[in-house]
Image (cartoon, rainbow, N blue to C red):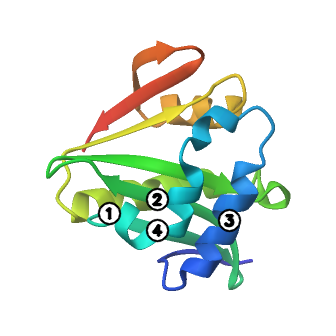
Amino acid sequence: MYFEVKKCADTTIIKELFIEYSHIQGAESCFVSFDKEVNNLESFYKGGVLLVGYEDEKPVACIAVKKIDDNVCEAKRLFIKPEYRGKGYARVMLNAMLDKSRELGFKKVTFTTKPSVMQVGYGLYKRMGFEEVSETDGIVSMCMAL
């Protein structure tokens, strides 16, 4: 089995992954203005990047980097298809996102997560060195200096 992360060349692929991700039970609050985002991926993520993880050439994971300003970006939409979880792909995706964020010149990466829904991801973020900045209504903001 071979896993590789590539910059998204076909937005249809990442749209399908994002839409599958949006169906996670309990994560509805993470998808405010989701239709606008999905229908304008190129402009929404301008200055950032869309990454897709492939297992044996099949798209099974995604993560996005959204430019906030010249120094700060936001990681969004980390998703591994359920049948491909438990293989370490989330860590590979996060590391690819961090590498790409540095390459794009960002100094800090932020993101939000909902630990009650995404306990495994939240634990991974903490183990990788992301720090909690704030929490509101069960949604946690985290960041890491690059």
What residue is pinned by disc 3? 17
Q: Quadrant of the C terminus?
A: top left
| SS label for mark 4 | loop
| Residue at left offset 41%, top offset 29% | 142
User: Label 2 neighbourhood size at 10 Å, few (<14), some (14-19), many (20+)?
Assistant: many
Q: Is residue 101 left or right of residue 63?
A: left
Q: Residue under circle 2?
A: 64
Q: Which residue is mark 4?
A: 40
Q: Secondary structure at mark 1?
A: loop
Q: Position of residue 21 (x, y in %)?
A: 70, 53
Distance between the alpha carbons at the discs numbered 3 and 2:
11 Å
Q: Is residue 135 above or below residue 16?
A: above
- Quick check: 88 left or right of 134? right
First in sequence, mark 3 or 2: give its number. 3
Q: Nearer the viewer, mark 3 or mark 4?
A: 4
Q: Which residue is mark 1?
A: 48
